[in-house]
Image: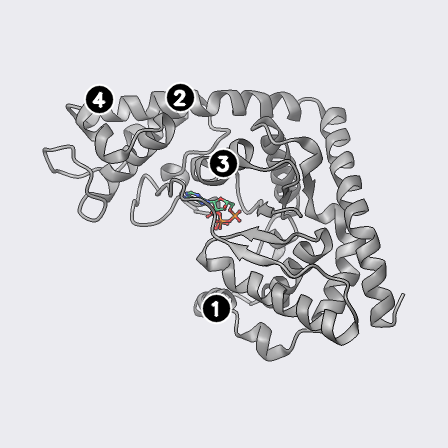
Amino acid sequence: MPRLSAITPSGPAHLGNYLGAIRRWAREGRPGDLYFVSDLHGMTTSYHPQRLRHRSRELLALLVAAGIEPDQIFVQSDLLPQLGPLTWVLECTCSFGEAARMTQFKEKSAARELAETPVRVGLFTYPVLMAADILLQGADEVPVGDDQAQHVELARSLARRFNTTFGDALVVPRAVTPPAAARVKDLSDPTRKMAKSTPDAAGVLFVMDEPDLLRRKVKRAVTDSFDRLEYHPDEQPGLANLLEIVAACTGKPAREVADAFGSYGELKDTVADLVIEELRPIRERTGELLADPPELDRIRRQGAERATERGADRLSTVLRLAGVG
Ligand code: AQP
């Protein structure tokens, strides 16, 4: 049974996405595991269509460049003909109250209302689409952080309810905690995590940034005025973030690597060198794939076909049991 993970093209992939997720997927994933670019989830807040398309393509290339087998990857919107009907069936299985309990919706919609920005119905229903992503592929394990665990719980309830109401058709998934990985912080504000959609890119190291730009961003990273270079994440989050990046790139504990540096300048030079070398092969391979549209199209088509085949029988059973189609 596969494990299913996703990445949303809400912005270009950054070092945090790479160290915290993509590199781990490539190194530690199991042969049957599945990965997808969740472009439909990228539509729940305001977005730019061409940018969404470009970023989805870039992310697909990046996952392949990172070493994940192409037949384990697909782009979510390529499955729209299957996801549409399954999402509808699941929406008709889900109560309004259940969907309204989703903490992420409450937080995101409250923030948007504060900013007087319209809240899209898609933001409300996207956990049901996420359930369809999981249930269509028959994934039994979904590695997620705390912020997504409630959505997997919803997928679990919906699968159970469908099976008991209409008949056994769906694998009941469960959320699993991914192995601990680096949590990379924004270099300009190390109290928040590095994120794709951060409007100010100065503190975000994008995988596709040129080496010179990566070095400039690292050089401008916020540190602090302490003399000693020690690992104290609460008191010195900027320094701790840089040490954690060194740790993630070298495989040594952050506390230990601190001893190797005499000054902030030295540490920043090393961080820049390590990040540049860590990302170089991925950036170059991604660039090659993007420069070869027929090859990338072939990979995408193949991934879509595999994923569609995986879900086809399950979807027909669901529709038949639900009395439609
Ligand atoms: N800063 C980070 N450090 C380590 N891991 C991170 N991930 C994200 N940011 C960091 C991991 O990347 C994977 C894909 O994330 P996602 O696309 O599902 O959404 P996200 O976590 O919301 O990613 P971002 O980059 O922060 O984007 P936005 O700005 O859209 O919110 C996940 O495994 C995540 O843990």
**Mark 4 and mark 2: span between their CA atoms?**
17 Å
Reading the image, the residue beneath label 1 is 103
Q: Position of residue 12 (x, y in %)?
A: 52, 38
Residue 266 is tagged as 4
Q: CA distance from mark 1 to mark 4?
A: 43 Å
Looking at the rendered structure, the secondary structure element under dot 4 is: helix
User: Disc 1 or 2, which lies upstream in sequence?
Assistant: 1
Which numbered mark, 3 or 4, is in the foreground of this view? 3
Residue 44 location (% of width, % of height):
60, 58
Q: Is residue 323 left or right of residue 118?
A: right
Which residue position holds label 2? 212
Viewer-side label of 1, 3 = 3
Amino acid type at circle 3 is Arg
Where is residue 225, by image quadrant?
top left
Question: Mark 4 belongs to which amino acid?
Answer: Glu
The disc, 1 or 4, on the residue closer to the chain's N-terminal end is 1
Cα distance between the residues tagged 1 and 2: 40 Å
Name the one closer to the observer, 79 or 310: 310
First in residue order: circle 4 vs circle 2: 2
How far is mark 3 from mark 4, CA to CA? 28 Å
Q: Secondary structure at mark 2?
A: helix
* Figure coloring: one colour
Residue at screen point 69% across, 59% down: 171
Name which quarter of the figure residue 262 lies in.
top left
